[in-house]
Image (cartoon, rainbow, N blue to C red):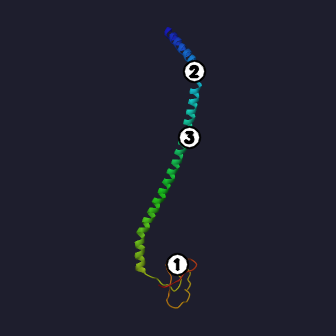
Amino acid sequence: MATIDARIAELSAEYKRLVDEIAKVDDLIDDGQVQEFVRARAKAVDELRKLRTQITTDELRGQVNELEINDLQRFLEYLEELSQKLPRAQASSDIVGNIEFTYCPAASTRPPSRPDPPLRMTFSSMSKRACNFTDSI
């Protein structure tokens, strides 16, 4: 029990010493140091806010760039697909050649009567309502 009482007395003395130090803290640090510390802390807080804002901005830019890259990759894939289809379409066009219609397949109408040269209609000139006939070339 004596060691417990001795330990309590020791801790009580340390507690009193710390309380006395805390009470004298204003004497140990002058107002200039306190003001300097407050200014430095405010500056650090401001810098931290700026850095957080910059990080957020950079993250958003990164996300936008990532979306643009994904869009460009899909567009590139589309262009590559078209570049593979183009020779086949050209070969089909060469095989089929020009097709002349007496009636418009989309609207079942006759081309306007014209003398020579005959009129030609291409698949690209057909619509659901009417066909556009062009002079043969």
- Pointer 2: what residue? 25
Q: CA distance from mark 1 to mark 2?
A: 93 Å
Amino acid at circle 2: Val
Q: CA distance from mark 1 to mark 3?
A: 62 Å
Q: Tell me which residue sits at (40%, 79%) in the image.
A: 95
Tell me the crowding category of disc 3: few under 14, some 14 to 19, or many 20 or more residues within 10 angstroms, Cα based. Answer: few
- Pointer 1: what residue? 125
Q: Secondary structure at mark 2?
A: helix
**Which one is earlier in the sequence, the residue at label 2 or at label 3?**
2
Percent of width and height locating residue 1: 50, 9
Residue nearest the viewer, comparing 5 with 36: 36
Q: Secondary structure at mark 1?
A: helix
Q: Which mark is residue 1?
A: none
Amino acid at circle 1: Ser
Percent of width and height locating residue 129: 58, 78
Amino acid at circle 3: Arg
Percent of width and height locating residue 104: 53, 82
Q: Tell me which residue sits at (56%, 15%) in the image.
A: 16
**Which one is earlier in the sequence, the residue at label 1 or at label 2?**
2
Q: Secondary structure at mark 3?
A: helix
Which one is in front in this view, the residue at disc 1 or the one at disc 3? 3
Q: Tell me which residue sits at (57%, 33%) in the image.
A: 39
- Pointer 3: what residue? 49
Dots 1 and 2: beta carbons under 8 Å?
no
Q: Tell me which residue sits at (59%, 25%) in the image.
A: 31
**Which one is earlier in the sequence, the residue at label 1 or at label 3?**
3
